[in-house]
Image (cartoon, rainbow, N blue to C red):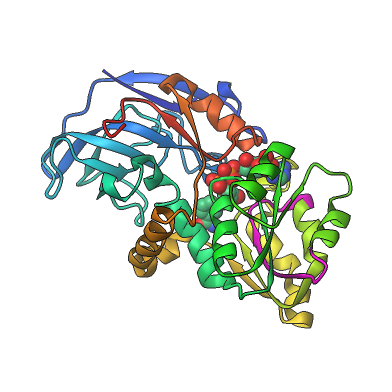
């Protein structure tokens, strides 16, 4: 038998609760022509999955979507053999099919992993979509120059920690924003970022002003809400803003305003101060930038220029709980759940 998580079918509130999900069993699927069966090793938990669920893109009974790292068990799919380690989208499921007729987002193409390039778990993190998100939003769109001031919110998280380090590599002065004192220490010490401010501070706006005496030239936004309100008054003329995500707006009920709402609110600064705003969607960068990104990021990771903290929970049963904790800031680094043996460890 195969086990998987699905939505339970009740109304969804602001943030995920364990009762929103139900564990189910089904007969183990068998690969048809052009398909392969794989065993899930790591499940990636990402804020956008909650957007899918709240937006009605995922129906009760369907396997909850997630990007995964897996090992092929049986293959009738060209280019994949039993034993291969792969990036794919098995979702919150212990086993799943990939290939012919198996739906997946167009830009989440299954690919074989080379364990020599880095830990296989990193294929859903720094050497995968989150790395490409930071690379496209910071290196390509924000394009910080030496000496400029860059602000990154959710700076210790899966995307944020990479975005901070890419700005540092470009020679910018970088200010992170994170929750706890421990996370802020990680940002300044492990990531070698100039300053980190806690968004839990009642004087956040004043602290950002103090941390950015020359204003802000590049703002990489993962959060929205009060953090956005505190940073945007500091934007310099011709600043670049990458709107990556708005995780805080799941908490305060303004998620419907979304990224587009932040873009709208920046319109006066675009008109009056030449601020450039990018509404980032990583899927737009896969076709043209994936190869260059993997080669650049692989080199930075190998050289220790980019370090990457993962928060790996253990056991298939904990997936919904780990998801809810990540959405509330209870993660420390990129959130994954390991659900079976990693043969490379
Ligand atoms: N545009 C794209 O194509 C794209 C692609 C991938 C991801 N994203 C976005 O990137 C962002 C980061 O995703 P991730 O996977 O790397 O998640 P993550 O940063 O690892 O986890 C979420 C973090 O958000 C912070 N947070 C939660 N609620 C907050 C609040 N009310 N105020 C301030 N911070 C809060 C928490 O950190 P603290 O403890 O520090 O508060 C938490 O650890 C998300 O907004 C996601 O939607 C966008």
Q: Residue at x 83, y 66 (%)?
A: 233
Q: Which quarter of the image is occupied by the C terminus?
A: top left
Q: Is 57 located above or below residue 2 in the figure? A: below
Viewer-proximal residue among 50 and 41: 41
Whether residue 278 is visible to the viewer of this picture, yes or no, is yes
162 versus 57 height, above or below: below
Q: Is residue 110 left or right of residue 131?
A: left
The image shows residue 199 at horizontal and vertical percentages of 77, 46
* Residue 258 higher or lower than 236, as above or below: above
Relative image position of residue 60 (x, y in whole percent): 46, 30
The residue under the point 67% across, 74% down is 147
Residue 180 in view of the camera: no
- The magenta segment is 212-226
Magenta span has 225? Answer: yes
Residue drawn at (56%, 58%), measured in percent from left and top? 165
**Taking 198 as reference, is 312 above or below it?**
above
Magenta stretch: includes residue 125: no
């Amino acid at each position: 038998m195969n086990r998987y998580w699905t939505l339970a079918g009740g109304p969804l509130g602001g943030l995920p609760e364990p009762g929103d999900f139900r564990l189910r069993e089904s007969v183990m699927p068998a690969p048809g022509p052009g398909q392969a069966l794989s065993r899930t090793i790591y499940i990636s938990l990402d804020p956008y999955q909650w957007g899918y669920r709240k937006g009605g893109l995922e129906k009760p009974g369907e396997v909850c979507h997630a990007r995964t790292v897996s090992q092929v068990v049986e293959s009738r799919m060209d280019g994949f053999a039993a034993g291969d380690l792969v990036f794919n989208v098995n979702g919150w499921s212990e086993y799943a099919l990939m290939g012919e007729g198996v739906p997946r987002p167009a830009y989440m193409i299954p690919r074989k992993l080379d364990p020599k390039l880095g830990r296989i778990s990193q294929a859903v993190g720094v050497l995968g979509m989150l790395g490409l998100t930071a690379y496209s939003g910071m290196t390509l769109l924000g394009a910080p120059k030496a000496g400029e001031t860059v602000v990154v919110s959710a700076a210790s998280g899966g995307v944020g920690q990479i975005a901070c380090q890419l700005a540092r590599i470009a020679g910018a002065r970088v200010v992170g924003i994170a929750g706890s004192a421990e996370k802020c220490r990680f940002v300044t010490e492990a990531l070698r970022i100039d300053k980190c401010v806690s968004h839990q501070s009642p004087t956040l706006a004043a602290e950002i002003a103090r941390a950015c005496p020359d204003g802000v030239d590049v703002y990489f936004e993962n959060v929205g809400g009060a953090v956005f309100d505190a940073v945007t008054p500091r934007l310099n003329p011709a600043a670049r803003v990458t709107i990556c995500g708005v995780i805080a707006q799941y908490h305060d009920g303004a998620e419907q305003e979304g990224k587009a709402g932040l873009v709208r609110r920046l319109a006066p600064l675009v008109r009056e101060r030449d601020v450039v705003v990018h509404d980032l969607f990583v899927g737009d960068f896969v076709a043209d930038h994936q190869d260059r990104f993997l080669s650049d990021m692989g080199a930075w990771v190998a050289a220790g220029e980019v370090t990457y903290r993962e928060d790996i929970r253990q056991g298939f049963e904990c997936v919904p709980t780990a998801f809810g904790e990540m959405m509330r800031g209870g993660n420390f680094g990129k959130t994954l759940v390991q659900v079976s043996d990693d043969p490379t460890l």
